[in-house]
């Protein structure tokens, strides 16, 4: 068992979580812009 593998897996999960957070923020911003540009 190499001690490097758990760190690599943890780093990959952290990167995936960060990317998911960025996508959620982008969706929120785009939704706000869409609502502002197209008022109901």
Image: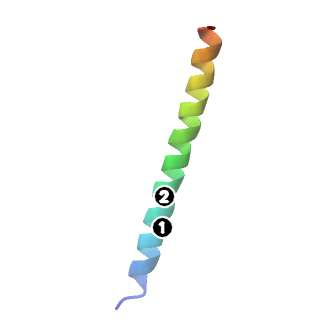
Q: Quadrant of residue 28?
A: top right
Q: Relative to 19, is 26 above or below?
A: above
Residue at horizontal 61 percent and vertical 16 percent from the top: 35
Residue at horizontal 49 percent and vertical 48 percent from the top: 20
C-alpha gap between disc 1 and disc 2: 6 Å
Q: Do tag 1 and tag 2 residues touch (Cβ < 8 Å)?
A: yes
How is the model colour-coded? rainbow
How far across and down, in percent of the image, does residue 6 sit?
43, 79
Residue at horizontal 61 percent and vertical 29 percent from the top: 29
Q: Relative to 34, is 22 above or below?
A: below
Residue at horizontal 42 percent and vertical 73 percent from the top: 8
Q: Which residue is mark 2?
A: 15
The quadrant of the picture occupied by the C terminus is: top right
Q: Which residue is mark 1?
A: 11
Relative horizontal placement of residue 32, taking residue 23 as reference (left or right):
right
List the single residue furthest toward the left: 1
How far across and down, in percent of the image, does residue 1 sit?
34, 91
Q: Name the residue nearer the viewer: 3 or 36.
A: 36
Q: Relative to 40, is 4 above or below?
A: below
Q: Residues within 10 Å of mark 1 (few under 14, many from 20)?
A: few
């Amino acid at each position: 068992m190499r001690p490097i593998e758990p760190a690599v897996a943890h780093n990959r999960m952290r990167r995936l979580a960060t990317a998911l957070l960025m996508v959620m923020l982008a969706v929120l911003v785009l939704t706000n812009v869409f609502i502002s540009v197209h008022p109901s």
